[in-house]
Amino acid sequence: MELQTTFRDYAGKDGQCSVIVDPAISGANATAVWNAISAMALGTPGNSYLASRDLNDTGSTSLPSDKFAQRTTKFRVEFTDDVNGEPGYFTIPTADLSLLAVNSHYVDLSGTEAAALVTALETYAKSRDGNAITVAYILEVSKAGQ
């Protein structure tokens, strides 16, 4: 089962985010994962979906006020499967670069927002094979001009 959400950037374009979650996840816990992801982004959160049912139907169509909310500025969340060690990742558009460690392209995982995201993911997210995951790092990746 996937948790899918969108983030609107300063130019009004949407970026997508999708993470595999436990099929038995409750709506409240899916919302907790969504909130943790949203705390890492500057963009305006749009609708979120869990499988085929609407999770957050109050997504906004307004534009973010921060001009640095760009869908091509992303965080890449790298993780490993706890059973077979296979790596995986997903991206979060409109990354809040203020969460980066000093003089680094990596997020400080001990920061409030990142720690909440790591906890939510390691509790509820799954690998492609359905196994628990461990977050390895969160890296800033940008693609200017897209």
Image: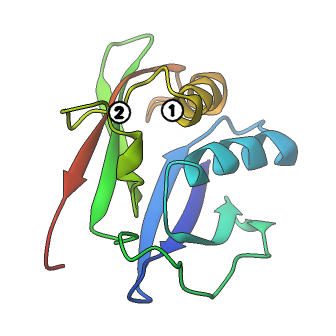
Count neighbours of disc 1 (C-alpha within 10 A) and say few if under 14, some if 14 to 19, many if 20 or more: many
Q: Which color scheme did the rendering employ for the protein?
A: rainbow
Residue at the image point whose x is 53% and y is 78% from the top = 64
Circles 1 and 2 in contact, beta carbons < 8 Å: yes
Q: Which residue is at 41% across, 41% downward?
A: 99
Give, as a three-letter code, the residue at label 2.
Answer: Val
Q: Which mark is residue 75?
A: none
Q: Residue at left 18%, top 33%?
A: 103
**Earlier sequence position, callout 1 versus callout 2:** 2
In which quadrant will I find the C terminus?
Answer: bottom left
Q: Which residue is mark 1?
A: 114
Q: Is residue 29 left or right of residue 71?
A: right
Separation of residues labelled 1 and 2 (CA atoms): 7 Å
Residue 116, position as x, y percentages in the image? 62, 30
- Residue 5 at x, y = what percent? 57, 64
| Residue 84 in picture, x, y percent from top left | 36, 12
Tell me residue 97's x, y (percent): 35, 50
- Is residue 23 depicted above or below 43 in this figure? above
Which quadrant would residue 122 be assigned to in this image? top right
Q: Circle 2 sits in a helix, a strand or a loop, which is it?
A: loop
* Front residue of this view, candidates 12 and 90: 12
The residue to which callout 2 is attached is 107
Q: Which amino acid type is marked by label 1?
A: Ala
Judge from the rendering whether residue 85 lies leftward or rightward of residue 27; answer left or right: left
Compared with 68, 23 (above or below) is: above
